[in-house]
Image: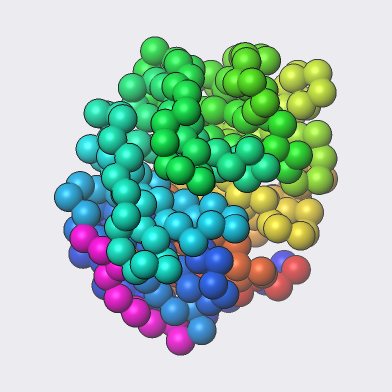
Amino acid sequence: MQAQKTAELTGHSNPIFTLELSQKPGILFTGGNDKGVVEWSLKENAFIKVMFPVPASIYALHCPAGYPLLFAGLRSGEVLVFNFIEQKITHRLRHHVKPVFDIKSVIKKDELLVASEDGSVSVWSLKTLELLHTINVADDTIRCITVNQQEDRIAFGCRDNRVIIYDAQDYSLIKVLIGHTMSVFAIAFAPNSDLLLSGARDAQVKIWDTKTYSLIHNIPAHLFAVNHILFHPSRPYFATASMDKSIKIWGADDFKLYKNISREKGYDSHALSVNKLAWNGDQLLSISDDKKVICWDIQF
């Protein structure tokens, strides 16, 4: 496996916390501790514009499939809804008063999930943008959400070290997974297998069997917190991003390390915590506290 840096996108003046690919090919959105959502061209490797200003740091961005909408979750607890057709913010979802850390959708139910530091998940209609339910998941922060490929299971990663599984149909509790010794920052269902991966501040990646909900493997993946886990959309690999400034690519079948992209390994990579990743085909995009977006061409 080879990794080649193809571009470095600069312009943010503060750490970047989140990124999201547009449904329009070749467009990337980023947000962080600046005062706006930034749009980039991946074809030109260039800044396009600041989409809209925000009153607080952005911790989550989400473009639900089939909807012309971009959701931005803020440190203030507010979620801004940008409509691509109208080219403006059309709604402000005001329910949480503590930071919003992740936003995902269950497309077959036309529902949006918003996870907050208050320990709850608000469920919204994607059609009407009305609040439908509130799920009280934990007593403290929910850091991350993942929805499985069949859209019948949802998993939440929590500050209290737990991974909590819910039924996507009626939002009933299915299972609590206990194994991490620190806050769970990253979580991902494998797209084509019965696996759930979780990563935490304890620097471990744990692999769980989603049929028995038993722990089947543990990877001492990084030196510091695992900030993000992301499966390749079509190949049997997943990538992890860490506070230790590295990006690692692992086999989804054998859990072996295939690539370590870091300064220690000779790459002109991030100088600070790598916060999140996105796969754009075989291109891997990374964002960091160092204010940079880096584009990597991965050759498998």
Residue under the point 45% across and 16% down:
136
Q: Nearer the viewer, residue 225 or 83?
A: 83
Say if 206 sits above or below 61 in the image: above
The boundaries of the magenta stretch are 44-53
Horizontal side, residue 83 vs residue 32: left or right:
right
Q: Quadrant of residue 147?
A: top right
The residue positioned 49% from the left and 61% from the top of the image is 68
Rendered location of residue 270, percent (x, y): 40, 62
Q: Quadrant of residue 117?
A: top left
Q: Residue 199's spot in the image, x, y percent?
A: 56, 34
Q: Is residue 63 magenta?
A: no
Task: Work out whether 293 lies above or below 248.
Answer: below
Residue 49 magenta: yes
Question: Would residue 222 be seen by someone viewing this image from the given angle?
Answer: no
Secondary structure that dominates the magenta span: strand
- Pick whichever, 250 or 102, lies toward us: 102
Outermost residue on the bottom side: it is 44
